[in-house]
Amino acid sequence: QGACNVARCVGEAMVINIVLDIIGFLVTPPGLYIVLAVFALVLLQLLYYRYKEQIDEVIFQFLDVLYAVAVAVKSCLQGILGVVQRAVYPVKESILGCVDAFDQYQNPYKLKVPYTNVPGFRVGFPATTHIPTFSY
């Protein structure tokens, strides 16, 4: 019976320690900031519900201005991206051309040369052999 009381006391002490740790977390800086943020959000929600009609007009106007600013920033960034792409492309192609030329110089077996003595197909030139046609 004494062992049960000791185990129960130890279990209760652990629960009390856990509760105190949670309370300590909520009143020290990392947890305190979370608690204050939640409190501020609840306060803002109460103020919003109290003055909903007056605040809605201001919120919609603010969102309209925010949208115009976002569209302007997006357009500027797209323009900057287009300029950067058009400016960097020739430089990239020049670098890759130099790398390819150096690679072909170092490894001549990688050169692309056409095969010789292979019959080719050309459009628009007369055929050298006679192709029979169908007639009734």
Image: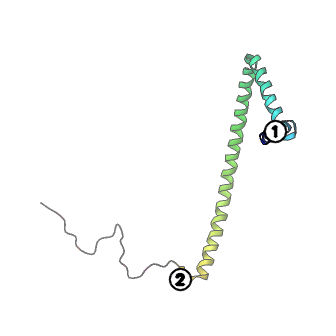
Q: Earlier in the sequence, mark 1 or mark 2?
A: 1
Measuring 65% from the left and 55% from the top, which residue is drawn there? 85
Please state the extent of the stretch shown in magenta in the rendering.
114-118
Residue 53 horizontal/vertical position (percent): 73, 16
Residue occupied by mark 2 = 109
- Mark identifier at residue 99: none
Mark 1 nearby-residue class (10 Å; few <14, some 14–19, many ≥20): few
Towards the viewer: 43 or 105: 43
Q: Quadrant of the N terminus?
A: top right
Would residue 28 be seen by someone viewing this image from the given angle? yes
Amino acid type at mark 1: Cys
Residue 108 horizontal/vertical position (percent): 56, 83
Q: Is residue 110 left or right of residue 127?
A: right
Instruction: Determine if the magenta segment contains residue 117.
Output: yes
Classify residue 18 by image quadrant.
top right
Magenta span: chief secondary structure: loop
Residue 33 horizontal/vertical position (percent): 84, 37
Q: Is residue 136 left or right of residue 9?
A: left
Classify residue 107 by image quadrant.
bottom right
* 91 in relation to 8, above or below: below
- Mark identifier at residue 9: 1
Residue 60 horizontal/vertical position (percent): 71, 25
Measuring 71% from the left and 39% from the top, which residue is drawn there? 72
